[in-house]
């Protein structure tokens, strides 16, 4: 991903919440310009770390490319000072629409599988954490 598609640049302080699980992001995709962002998923009473996203990595890209414009799957929190840009979804759609139908289907399927696997991993991690009590 590159900065050429940035629609809006936002800055966050350490531990500041960028968005919460369940928030309506309207299909937004973010690019981390600097810093790190922790992605967590609530399971029961615990927050399970799903991933730490670093500079030049995306947030929401899997959902966007998978065709899922539903609410946020995770909570995103700044680790230290973070600068992110909100990518223009129309620009990304234009690029995706240039792909062959077969390749678009492959990307959609891969993103769905990734999201499902991530969800299963979060559930497993939560079960392991509860078993350790």
Image (cartoon, rainbow, N blue to C red):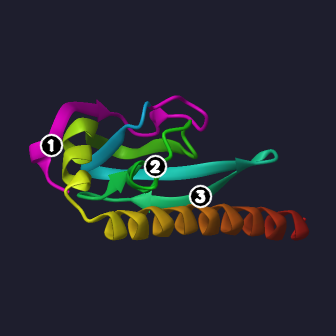
Name the residue rendered at 36%, 34% in the picture. Answer: 13
Name the residue rendered at 33%, 69% in the picture. Answer: 103
For discs 3 and 1, the disc positioned in front in the rendered view:
1
Residue hosting label 2:
67
Q: Is residue 96 left or right of residue 36?
A: left
**Distance in Å between CA atoms under marks 3 and 1:** 28 Å
**Distance in Å between CA atoms under marks 2 and 1:** 19 Å
Question: Label 2 crowding class (10 Å Cα cut-off): few <14, some 14-19, many 20+?
Answer: some
Residue 15 in view here: yes
- The single residue placed furthest to the front in the displayed view is 101
Whether 23 is drawn above or below 45: the answer is above
> Is residue 12 inside the magenta stretch?
yes
Q: Is residue 41 left or right of residue 20?
A: right
Sooner in the amino-acid sequence: mark 2 or mark 1 = 1
Residue hosting label 1:
5
Residue hosting label 3:
49
**Distance in Å between CA atoms under marks 3 and 2:** 24 Å
Residue 116 rendering spot, x and y as whole percentages? 63, 63
For discs 2 and 1, the disc positioned in front in the rendered view:
2
Foreground residue among 110 and 101:
101
Element at badge 1?
helix
Element at badge 2?
loop
Magenta-colored span: 1-25
């Amino acid at each position: 991903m590159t900065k050429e598609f940035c629609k809006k640049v936002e800055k966050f302080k350490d531990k500041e919440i960028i968005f919460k699980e369940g928030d309506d992001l309207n299909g937004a995709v973010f690019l981390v310009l600097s810093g790190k962002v922790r992605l967590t998923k609530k399971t029961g009473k615990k927050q399970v770390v799903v991933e730490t996203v670093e500079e030049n990595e995306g947030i929401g890209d899997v959902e966007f490319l998978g065709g899922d414009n539903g609410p946020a799957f995770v909570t995103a929190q700044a680790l230290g000072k973070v600068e992110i840009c909100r990518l223009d979804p129309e620009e990304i759609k234009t690029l995706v629409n240039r792909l062959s139908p077969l390749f678009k289907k492959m990307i959609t399927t891969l993103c769905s599988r990734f999201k499902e696997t991530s969800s299963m991993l979060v559930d497993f991690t939560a079960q392991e954490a509860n078993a350790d009590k």
